[in-house]
Amino acid sequence: MASPLVLRGVEVALGDRQVLRGIDLELHPGEVLLLAGPNGVGKTTLLRAACGLVSPSRGEVELAGRPLRAWSRRALARELALVPQETSVPFPFRVDEIVLMGRTPHQGWFGFESAEDRRRAHEALERLALLHLADRSILELSGGERQLVMVARAMAQDAKILLLDEATAHLDLARRLELLALLREWAAEGRSALAVSHDLALSLRAADRVALLAEGRIHSQGAPADVITPETLRHVFDIEADVLSHPTGPLIVPRPS
């Protein structure tokens, strides 16, 4: 089976700043790939390039064997769903209305939702344990609740690939663990997820592979146990830490300064 999403030699410049340099990365079917690295190294830009919101100055992004630029926005939205780090909703839409918006790529030109659309939206709310918020205004929710609503909208979109930018950032510990378990379920269904997270120690629990980004380049990628070492943590994050083996993934233990 071909990799659903491939970045080949991707370079991105924003203004006069070179943000990404020669990125080679594949998202495999049925996996969760964790993208990590320090602040400002280009993780969000990489996600935006992966879904066509940023055009590479060099290199190519391919989806299902076709260049991303060959896809229409509507067709692309049936394959890729993005959960951005911040989402501004200026109007008091209800939570169920926001999630139902994820069905837009599957609707006809007149935008009328079907019984199947409503079923998918309800299923996504149920999956994220948000049914009790369905009638609430999005503007009344906490930051963490809003983020979960955006994940539910992306899942209702029924895309094969989820792109998540710091989706656990505003969540409490229990909700973080629930979302990471949900990503594992997502991958077990044959879909894929590319997740950016600063919560490296916890997010490794859900990852099949990890790619570390440093200075706009992929420093290393592979199985978490192979990539997360004291040497890579020192080089990429400038920290001294021990890495312990554990069934849920590598455990990072910072050394006293």
Image: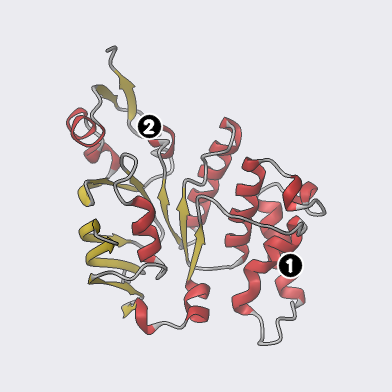
- Please tell me which residue is depicted at 74% across the width and 63% down the height of the picture: 97
Q: Amino acid at mark 2?
A: Pro
Q: Position of residue 232 (x, y in %)?
A: 20, 35
- Determine contact: label 1, label 2, CB under 8 Å: no
Farthest right residue in view: 135
Q: Is residue 203 above or below residue 73?
A: above
Q: Is residue 28 left or right of residue 222?
A: right
Farthest bottom residue in view: 109
Q: Is residue 9 above or below residue 44?
A: below
- Please tell me which residue is depicted at 55% across the width and 48% down the height of the picture: 182
Q: SS of the residue at dot 1?
A: helix
Locate the N terminus by quadrant: bottom left
- Please tell me which residue is depicted at 40% across the width and 38% down the height of the picture: 198
> Would you name the residue on which mark 1 appears?
119
Q: Amino acid at mark 1?
A: Arg
Q: Position of residue 29 (x, y in %)?
A: 38, 63
Locate the C terminus by quadrant: top left
Q: Is residue 216 left or right of residue 120?
A: left
Q: Position of residue 56 (x, y in %)?
A: 28, 69
Q: Position of residue 159 (x, y in %)?
A: 52, 68
- Please tell me which residue is depicted at 22% across the width and 67% down the height of the picture: 8
> Would you name the residue on which mark 2 appears?
247
Q: Is residue 96 left or right of residue 84?
A: right
Q: Is residue 211 left or right of residue 84?
A: left
Towards the viewer: 210 or 142: 142
Dot 2: within a 10 Å radius of its alpha carbon, few (fewer than 14), some, or many (20 or more) residues? few
